Amino acid sequence: MKLYFVPRTRSTRPRWMLEELGVPHELVRLDPSKGDTRSDEHTNRHPLQHVPVLETRDGSVFESAAIVLHLADLHPEKKLLGPVGSHARALAYQWLFFAMTELEPPCIEFTLLKKAGQLDTPEAHAVREKFSLAIRPLERRFSSGDYLIGDEFSAADVVVGAVLSWANSLGLVADAPNVSVYLERIKARPAFKRAFGD
Ligand SMILES: N[C@@H](CCC(=O)N[C@@H](CS)C(=O)NCC(=O)O)C(=O)O
């Protein structure tokens, strides 16, 4: 099993998952500045020339959250995803879709505004507001639980945790004390440190 990645990108999500699972894998680091992601070989793996891509003996898969789910499915013995049809599994779907459709878009918008030097603008203010509304279900969840689902760390924490870590690096996690404590909890995990270490 190979993971094609670029450090400090959405690749950290499946990298972190692989570290949590502790299963053998090969990491293939690509350098976009050298054109690695634009090669014909990589375009066959990912037509948008993005990372991450997971390659197994059955074929390749892109989209970070899908890869995290698939890795959990490949290793049910690690119990990072509830059984098919269980409520725990439904909650995993809920939080993963939530991360990708509610939490991530304001992070993307804010990153673009930051790159354009437009943080002191009404647009940036609106994005901050959008994120602080989006984070509310998490603030509520972490008022009564250490992790997203039940009492145990799961695949959902990998995806939501990685997006929150991105948001935090942008200064978006303000006035959310429960989320801040959760972030410290997950950042202390050895697997997180290994995945985010470069
Ligand atoms: N929705 C996709 C987004 C993938 C994506 O946009 N990846 C970025 C890095 S975070 C990328 O590959 N950009 C092109 C590049 O780095 O050359 C996912 O979650 O996997």
Image (cartoon, rainbow, N blue to C red):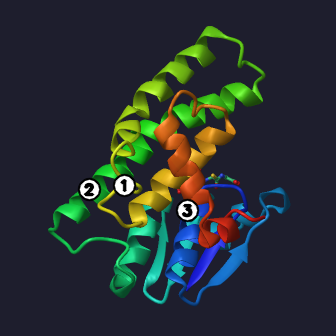
Q: Taking 153 as reference, is 4 left or right?
A: right
Disc 3 to disc 2, C-alpha distance: 18 Å
Three-letter code, disc 3: Arg
- Front label number (1 vs 2): 1
| Res 7 → quadrant | bottom right
Disc 1 to disc 3, C-alpha distance: 16 Å
Q: Are marks 1 and 2 in contact (CB under 8 Å)?
A: yes
On whether ligand 1 comes within 8 Å of the CB at mark 3, the answer is yes
Q: Can see residue 11? A: no
Three-letter code, disc 2: Leu
On whether ligand 1 comes within 8 Å of the CB at mark 2, the answer is no
Question: Is disc 2 placed on a helix, strand or loop?
Answer: helix
Q: Which residue is mark 1?
A: 148
Looking at the image, the residue that sits furthest to the right is 34
Q: Which residue is mark 3?
A: 13
**Residue 104 rendering spot, x and y as whole percentages:** 50, 41
Considering only order in the chain, which callout, 2 or 3, is on the residue closer to the N terminus? 3
- Front label number (3 vs 2): 2
Q: Taking 196 as reference, is 98 left or right?
A: left
Q: Nearer the viewer, residue 171 or 181?
A: 181
Q: Taking 125 as reference, is 129 left or right?
A: left
Residue located 76% across and 30% down the image: 115
Q: Which residue is mark 2?
A: 91
- Front label number (1 vs 3): 1
The answer to whether residue 1 is above or below residue 151 is: below
Residue located 55% across and 42% down the image: 180
Residue located 41% across and 55% down the image: 146
Q: Are marks 1 and 3 in contact (CB under 8 Å)?
A: no
- Quadrant that contains the C terminus: bottom right
Three-letter code, disc 1: Leu
